[in-house]
Image: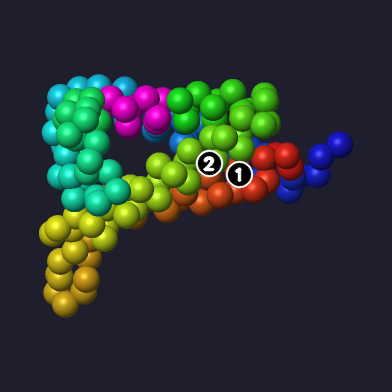
């Protein structure tokens, strides 16, 4: 029988996995719209490791590719609740995805500015530290979950 602390940890992990999956599914589907394709273009075009994709896939193609990766990651997260090995692969994709999105803070012009003498950024990118941490946890501990 599990202790109360272990049950709470399990519930917390399930909420993180399903919450991340929901967000990835939602955003992944939105990537197939022209609105989102244009919205991510300034971020992607200034990322030196990814900007080349536009010359091959075009604006919508790049967005579609990212959407597919996000949807696949979400599906792996959901299936990983029953098939633990899939959490390892989901973790690797989370690390890849969110390392790239966090890199936009350093590669996108105009992201950093000063407000009342305090450096600030587009904080929507900083939220990606949380699923990055989940990815690291899943990749390292998938057998224990």
**What residue did someone put label 1 on?**
139
Quarter of the rendering containing residue 69? top left
Q: Determine whether the residue tagged by mark 1 lies in a helix, strand or loop.
A: helix
Instruction: Give the mark count.
Output: 2
Spot occupied by residue 11 in the image (x, y as percentages of width and height) = 63, 38
Separation of residues labelled 2 and 1 (CA atoms): 6 Å
Q: Is residue 117 above or below residue 84?
A: below
Q: Nearer the viewer, residue 51 or 91?
A: 51
Indicate the position of residue 81 as horizontal and vertical percent values.
63, 28
Q: Secondary structure at mark 2?
A: helix
Please identify the quarter of the rendering in which residue 14 is found.
Answer: top right
Relative side of 137 to 52, left or right: right
> Where does the magenta region start and end?
63-71
Judged left or right of residue 42, residue 25 is right
Q: Residue at x 60, y 48 (%)?
A: 137
- Mostly what secondary structure, the magenta segment? helix
Residue placed under numbered mark 2 in the picture = 92
Q: Judge the density around disc 2: few (<14), some (14-19), many (≥20) Cα neighbours within 10 Å.
A: some
**Is residue 16 at least partly visible in the picture?**
no
Estimate the x, y position of residue 52 in percent, counting from the top left: 22, 41
Q: Quadrant of the N terminus?
A: top right
Quadrant the C terminus occupies: top right
> At 13% from the left edge and 59% from the top edge, which residue is drawn?
110
Instruction: Kindly indicate whether the residue at mark 1 contacts the one at mark 2 (C-beta within 8 angstroms).
Output: yes
- On the question of residue 74 being in view, the answer is yes
Let me know if residue 36 is in the magenta part.
no
Residue 64 covered by magenta stretch? yes
Q: Of the numbered discs in the image, which one, if any, rests on residue 25?
A: none
Upstream in sequence: badge 2 or badge 1: 2
> What residue do we see at 56% from left, 49% from top?
136
């Amino acid at each position: 029988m599990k202790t109360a602390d272990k049950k709470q940890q399990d519930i917390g992990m399930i909420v993180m996995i399903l919450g991340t999956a929901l967000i990835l599914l939602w955003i992944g589907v939105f990537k197939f719209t022209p609105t989102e394709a244009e919205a991510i273009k300034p971020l992607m075009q200034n990322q030196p490791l990814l900007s080349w994709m536009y010359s091959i896939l075009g604006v919508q193609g790049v967005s579609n590719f990212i959407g597919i990766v996000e949807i696949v990651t979400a599906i792996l997260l959901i299936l990983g609740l029953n098939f633990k090995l899939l959490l390892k692969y989901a973790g690797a994709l989370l690390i890849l995805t969110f390392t790239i999105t966090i890199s936009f803070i350093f590669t996108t012009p105009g992201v950093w500015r000063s407000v009342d003498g305090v450096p600030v950024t587009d904080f929507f990118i900083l939220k990606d530290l949380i699923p990055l941490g989940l990815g690291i946890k899943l990749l390292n501990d998938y057998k224990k979950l």
